[in-house]
């Protein structure tokens, strides 16, 4: 029985490595960037907030600096009980609008808050008579920091009327603070440069919330409430846009920076929410099977069904540990196990991806040498065991019927400070 489990584990590892290698080779190719054609768009930044006084001040100052004169910055305060609303209300710039949601409507999920912002844009006349296909909604987390050239880089993609959304790369701003934050940065870099770039070639890159640009007409194509109540509303939205016939692009050469978590418990808590949201998105599987085909369907199913891979991985890990314990207790097996060939085989099967992902991260990060990237490549393999714990935590939450939002706690931002003097004349 143990032999069968080990063979299954080896087969699974080889399949995963082959898939990753294929993505790696394809992503290494040259990608053409659109040039010009980004004029005539109105950009609306939308920032959902729940108790974000630690970071929202610095975020708004940067968005004001980046926003065009005819732009808009819509902050949705979703029932905060700290000083978030007061901080936002202290910004006198007329482009900053504060939408306050109070119970019982508040705190019903990020998707509901975002739908409220879309209704404000349409019903309140905030975008005037501008055509929905010329209005771009940029979703920002409260700790998001766009690159200065981000708008100039992203807007040309929307010159193609088939493009409904674009996702920029994500980096961790405090990656030098801890090894855990550094590994989260590596996770986002690998995801962007390995998988997102490849999927962007055929127009179905995933959407990740922060730094996510969407054409207003594409959102309206999904109905009056484009965002669902899913715990991963961004995943849900991206898949439905592709199924509706829109292209979703990856703009990998510009980024948004955000805070990384420095607590392992907080990281597991966050990833358990992501896991639970992926399971909620299984309702889209029949639509993918019925409306998509070929590689698009295969990769969308791979994304949606990734929780199953976590379960398989956890059982493989347990079977490997059981076999090691059994071998340790058996003198004959112990003699066979600790010979050079089994040790080398185990190392290759476990850490082979580190030799692809480590140098890739070193090249992209800009602050690591090749050897340092290789070290982090090995740590990254171990770091991914977090998903096994988070997956079972998410299962536990589903079993007991808990579907509430597990909000990520922010770190104090030294740039946050206070709002500029003056007030916005009223909020909605």
Image (cartoon, helix red, strand yellow):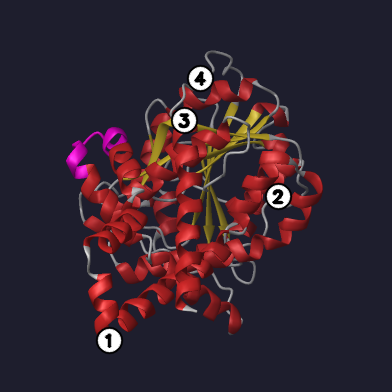
**Do the numbered discs 3 and 2 sit on residues whose CB atoms are within 8 Å?**
no
Quarter of the view holding residue 220: top right
Q: Which residues are magenta?
A: 362-372
Kindly give the residue lying farthest to the top in the view shown: 36
Residue 293 vs 43, above or below: the answer is below
Q: Mark 4 — residue?
A: 33
Whole-angstrom CA distance, mark 3 to mark 2, is: 24 Å
Residue 131: image location, x then y, percent: 73, 27
Q: Which SS type dominates the magenta stretch?
A: helix
In what element is the residue under mark 1?
helix
Residue 42: image location, x then y, percent: 59, 27
Q: Mark 2 — residue?
A: 226
Q: Residues within 10 Å of mark 4 (few under 14, many from 20)?
A: few
- Residue 240 within the magenta-colored segment of the rendering: no
Residue 23 vs 303, above or below: the answer is above
**Do the numbered discs 4 and 3 sit on residues whose CB atoms are within 8 Å?**
no
**Do the numbered discs 1 and 3 sit on residues whose CB atoms are within 8 Å?**
no
Q: Which callout, 2 or 1, points at the residue further toward the start of the chain?
A: 2
Give the foreground label among 1 and 3.
1
Residue 67's tag is: 3
Give the foreground label among 4 and 3.
4
Q: Mark 1 — residue?
A: 329
Whole-angstrom CA distance, mark 4 to mark 3, is: 23 Å
Q: Which callout, 1 or 3, points at the residue further toward the start of the chain?
A: 3
In what element is the residue under mark 3?
loop
Q: Residue at x 50, y 79 (%)?
A: 1
Q: Is residue 319 left or right of residue 128?
A: left
Give the foreground label among 2 and 4.
4
Q: Which callout, 3 or 2, points at the residue further toward the start of the chain?
A: 3
């Amino acid at each position: 029985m143990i032999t069968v489990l080990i063979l299954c584990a080896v087969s699974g590892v080889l399949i995963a490595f082959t898939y990753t290698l294929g993505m790696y080779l394809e992503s290494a190719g040259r990608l053409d960037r659109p040039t010009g054609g980004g004029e005539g768009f109105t950009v609306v930044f939308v920032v959902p907030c729940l108790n974000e006084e630690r970071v929202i001040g610095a975020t708004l100052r940067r968005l004001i600096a980046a926003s065009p004169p005819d732009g808009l910055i819509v902050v949705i305060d979703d029932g905060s009980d700290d000083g978030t609303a007061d901080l936002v209300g202290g910004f006198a710039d007329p482009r900053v609008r504060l939408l306050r949601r109070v119970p019982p409507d508040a705190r019903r999920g990020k998707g509901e808050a975002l739908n409220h912002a879309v209704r404000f844009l349409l019903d309140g006349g905030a975008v005037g008579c501008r055509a929905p296909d010329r209005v771009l909604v940029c979703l920002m987390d409260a700790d998001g920091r766009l690159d200065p050239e981000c708008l100039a880089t992203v807007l040309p993609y929307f010159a193609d009327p088939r493009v409904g959304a674009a996702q920029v790369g994500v980096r961790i701003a405090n990656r030098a603070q801890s090894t855990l934050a550094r590994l989260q940065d590596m996770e986002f870099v690998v995801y962007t440069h390995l998988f997102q770039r490849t999927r962007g070639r055929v127009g179905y890159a995933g959407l990740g919330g922060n730094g996510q640009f969407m054409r207003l007409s594409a959102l309206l194509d999904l109905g009056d409430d484009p965002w669902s109540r899913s715990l991963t509303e961004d995943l849900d939205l991206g898949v439905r846009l592709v199924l509706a016939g829109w292209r979703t692009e990856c703009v990998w050469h510009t980024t948004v920076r955000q805070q990384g978590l420095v607590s392992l418990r907080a990281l597991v808590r966050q990833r358990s929410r992501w896991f639970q949201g992926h399971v909620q998105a299984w309702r889209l599987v029949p639509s993918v099977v019925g409306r998509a085909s070929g590689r698009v369907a295969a990769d969308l199913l791979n994304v949606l069904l990734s929780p199953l891979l976590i379960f398989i991985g956890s059982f493989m890990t347990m079977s490997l540990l059981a076999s090691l314990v059994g071998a340790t207790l058996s003198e004959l097996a112990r003699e066979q196990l600790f010979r050079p060939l089994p040790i080398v085989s185990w190392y290759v099967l476990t850490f082979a991806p580190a030799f692809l992902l480590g140098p890739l991260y070193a090249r992209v990060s800009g602050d690591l040498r090749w050897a340092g990237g290789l070290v982090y490549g090995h740590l990254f393999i171990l770091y991914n065991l977090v998903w096994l714990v988070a997956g079972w935590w998410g299962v536990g939450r589903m079993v007991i019927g808990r579907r509430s939002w597990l909000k990520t706690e922010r770190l104090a931002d030294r740039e946050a400070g206070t709002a500029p003097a003056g007030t916005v004349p009223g909020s909605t």
